[in-house]
Amino acid sequence: MKKFVVLMLLVVVVTATAFSADLVISATVAASVSVSVANTNAVPLTLTTAGAQTKKVGEATFSSNTTGWTVSVSSLNNGVLLGGAGASVAYTLQIADIMGTSTALTTAVKTFSQTLKMNALVKDVSITYTGVPTLAADTYSDTVTITVSAP
């Protein structure tokens, strides 16, 4: 009988032993940044009016889930509104609260860093130029590329 009780106690001890394991649940969210641009140039640029002029030409909408993103701005014509006959009007560009001051786009790319996280942050894009009263009749244009990248 004693052997039977010892055997039963041994069985109870063995069956009462518990095992455990941890399950780690995690997810990684990748950095995400984007920019879209809307042309809001409803008021035409008056290139032949003498003197310095600042005009809103668009709105840039930035979205990001990270800090430290970078905005780069480049111009197809290096910051010049170029006419088909070769005449031109130089300008500087500003993205409100992103670039600080109006900046000449005479080099390939201008880069500005931001430390904000944001969702659908809309900023005015404007240009400043000096009108040329003797400018020939033509269409004057430039293409500006705004790029946003994650750190």
Image (cartoon, rainbow, N blue to C red):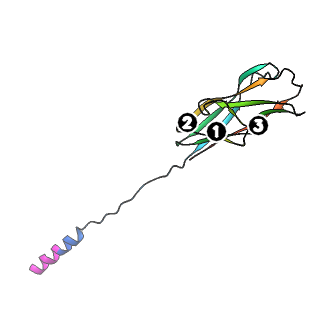
Q: Secondary structure at mark 2?
A: strand
Question: Which numbered disc covers residue 35?
Answer: 1
Looking at the image, can residue 52 be seen?
yes
* Residue 2 on the magenta segment: yes
Q: Which residues are magenta?
A: 1-9
Q: Which residue is mark 2?
A: 119
* Label 2 crowd (10 A; few <14 / some 14-19 / many >=20): few
Q: Which tag, 2 or 1, sits closer to the chain's start?
A: 1
Kind of element beneath mark 1: strand
Q: Is residue 9 above or below residue 102?
A: below
Q: Position of residue 94 (x, y in %)?
A: 66, 30
Left/right of residue 119 with respect to residue 46 in the rendered view:
left
Whole-percent x, y for residue 51 in the image: 76, 19
Tag 3–tag 2 contact (CB < 8 Å): no
Q: Nearer the viewer, residue 70 or 107?
A: 107
Question: Of the residues under marks 1 and 3, which one precedes in the sequence?
Answer: 1
Residue positioned 51% across, 49% down in the render: 29
Q: Quadrant of residue 40?
A: top right
- Type of amino acid under label 1: Val
Q: Is residue 74 magenta?
A: no
Disc on the earlier residue, 3 or 2: 2
Q: Is residue 1 above or below residue 19?
A: below
Residue of label 3: 143
The residue under the point 24% across, 70% down is: 15
Q: Nearer the viewer, residue 63 or 110?
A: 110
How far apart are labels 1 and 3 at the CA level? 16 Å
> Image point 75% across, 26% down: which residue?
129
Percent x, y of residue 5: 12, 76
Q: Main secondary structure of the magenta part?
A: helix
Tag in front: 3 or 2: 3
